[in-house]
Image: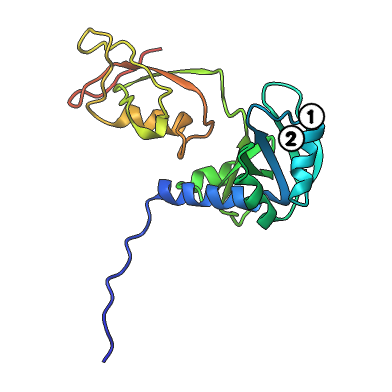
């Protein structure tokens, strides 16, 4: 007799985007290449530092000379795990490729997918400059803004509310929050790193009006 199974709930777009991003990071990892940070007491540039890696069958490829006591090494994964357990080691992290652009796989909006490619079919990706609007300030004149929304990543602040005549432009409608998310939200935005200053010019009952 066949057993019925409860269908799985589909993952939310943001959760799916995060899972895909983690998979993409794993795909860019460099096999056998690690960045090792040492604890105080053993200098990465010293003979003892080189001997520590050699003890686990690895070789030093590059020594970092500023900020942190670390080097880049080559060694097998099993040896890297043993090295990470050594008392002289603070951390062992697999090295990975870093690109000047970022790609969101399976974006939650087909519009994002369409922006970065002139030809069809869509490739289920949205690629954008890694600086992604950083340093820009966006002024949203709309129904206000819910600055606590997770899509904003803490980059939104309160602006002027022309309806209630105060400095907290709360969004009682949702339209202003939607617009701001399209402008620069973490999952739904075109650029990903601007800051917002909202201004409320209408309420949930009265439509917004603009004048030239």
Instruction: Name the N-terminal-most of marks 2 and 1.
Output: 1
Quadrant of the rendered structure where residue 38 is? top right
User: Quarter of the image containing the C terminus?
Assistant: top left
- Closer-to-camera residue (198/210): 198
Q: Residues within 10 Å of mark 2 (few under 14, many from 20)?
A: many
> Is 12 displayed left or right of 107 in the figure?
left
Quadrant of the rendered structure where residue 182 is? top left
At 58% from the left and 29% from the top, the residue drawn is: 132
At 45% from the left and 47% from the top, the residue drawn is: 108
The reply to whether dot 2 and dot 1 touch (C-beta < 8 Å) is yes
Q: For marks 2 and 1, give the CA distance.
A: 8 Å
Q: Position of residue 85 (x, y in %)?
A: 59, 46
At 52% from the left and 43% from the top, the residue drawn is: 112
Give SS at disc 2.
strand
Question: Is the image coloured rainbow, by chain, by secondary structure, or in one colour?
Answer: rainbow
Q: Position of residue 122 (x, y in %)?
A: 58, 54
Q: Is residue 117 visible?
A: no
User: Mark 1 — residue?
Assistant: 45
Q: Position of residue 20 (x, y in %)?
A: 52, 51
- Closer-to-camera residue (126/142): 126
Above or below: residue 201 compared with residue 121: above
Q: Residues within 10 Å of mark 1 (few under 14, many from 20)?
A: some
At 31% from the left and 10% from the top, the residue drawn is: 160
Above or below: residue 166 compared with residue 109: above
User: Mark 2 — residue?
Assistant: 71
> Is 33 displayed left or right of 170 in the figure?
right
Label number found at residue 143: none
Give SS at disc 1.
loop
């Amino acid at each position: 007799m066949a057993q019925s199974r409860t269908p799985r709930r589909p993952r939310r777009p943001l959760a799916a985007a995060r899972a895909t991003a983690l998979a993409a990071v794993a795909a860019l990892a460099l096999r056998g290449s690690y960045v090792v940070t040492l604890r105080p007491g053993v200098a990465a540039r010293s003979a003892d530092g080189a001997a520590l890696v050699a003890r686990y069958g690895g070789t030093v490829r590059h020594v970092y000379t500023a900020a942190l006591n670390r080097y880049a090494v080559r060694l097998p994964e099993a040896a890297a795990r043993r090295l990470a357990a050594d008392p002289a080691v603070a951390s062992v992290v697999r090295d990975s490729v870093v690109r000047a652009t970022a790609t969101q796989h399976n974006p939650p909006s087909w519009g994002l997918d369409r922006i970065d490619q002139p030809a069809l079919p869509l490739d289920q990706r949205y690629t954008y400059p890694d600086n992604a609007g950083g340093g820009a300030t966006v002024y949203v004149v709309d129904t206000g803004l819910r600055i606590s929304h997770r899509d904003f990543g803490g980059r939104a602040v309160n602006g002027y509310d022309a309806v209630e005549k105060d400095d907290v432009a709360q969004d009682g409608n949702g339209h202003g929050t939607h617009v701001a998310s399209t402008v620069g939200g973490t999952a739904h935005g075109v650029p990903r790193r601007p800051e917002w200053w909202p201004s409320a010019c209408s309420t949930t009952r009265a439509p917004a009006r603009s004048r030239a």
